[in-house]
Amino acid sequence: MLAFLPSVTWQGDFNAAKQQAAKEHKLILINFSGSDWCIPCIRLRKEILESSTFENYASDHLVLVRADFPRQKKNMPSKEQMKLNDALADKYNAGGKFPYTLLVDENGKVLKSWDGFPDETPDQFVSDISEFAQQVK
């Protein structure tokens, strides 16, 4: 029998994510990624963000936002999405770090950040996040 995995959706619009987070009383996880050139970004996605542990937790507790900055033309997001990504990077990732992951509240206040690949298991990553989620409730 196949295990059912909740589907998680990564959004591209931070303002929409903030509205959703406020309505659902959730925290927002922002992931800055270079999906087609940044090896630690790809590792983070595959080993942690796409793990069943993370997805199970995220589906109930987080609003997810990804700002992707690929280099290959075929992977480029739309012009509108690039504007949204650039605006988010200007606000939260002016140094252009990849991967860079932030946990923010519904108002956009940074609670925690991970600079580079978090050297932890999906369980530890979720545990880090849930500690902040408990404090916010």
Image (tube, helix red, strand yellow):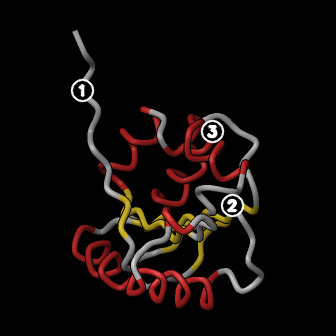
Q: Nearer the viewer, mark 1 or mark 2?
A: 2
- Badge 1 is on which residue? 4
Left or right of 38? Residue 81 is left
Q: Earlier in the sequence, mark 1 or mark 2?
A: 1
- Badge 2 is on which residue? 99
Q: Residue at x 51, y 81 (%)?
A: 85
Q: Which amino acid type is shown beneath numbered disc 3?
A: Gln
- Badge 3 is on which residue? 124
**Percent coordinates x, y for residue 42 in the rendering:** 63, 47
How far apart are labels 2 and 3 at the CA level? 18 Å
**Percent coordinates x, y for residue 102 in the rendering:** 59, 67
**Percent coordinates x, y for residue 119 in the rendering:** 76, 42
How dense is the environment of label 3, judged by Cα within 10 Å: few (below 14), some, or many (20 and up)? some
How dense is the environment of label 2, judged by Cα within 10 Å: few (below 14), some, or many (20 and up)? many
Instruction: Say above or below: 79 vs 36.
Output: below
How far apart are labels 1 and 2 at the CA level? 29 Å
Which residue is more in the foreground, 104 or 45?
45
Left or right of 6? Residue 11 is right
Q: Which amino acid type is shown beneath numbered disc 1?
A: Phe
Q: Residue at x 56, y 39 (%)?
A: 46
Q: Nearer the viewer, mark 2 or mark 3?
A: 2
Q: Residue at x 29, y 32 (%)?
A: 5
Left or right of 100? Residue 52 is left
Q: Residue at x 63, y 62 (%)?
A: 34
Left or right of 59? Residue 35 is right
Q: Nearer the viewer, mark 1 or mark 3?
A: 1
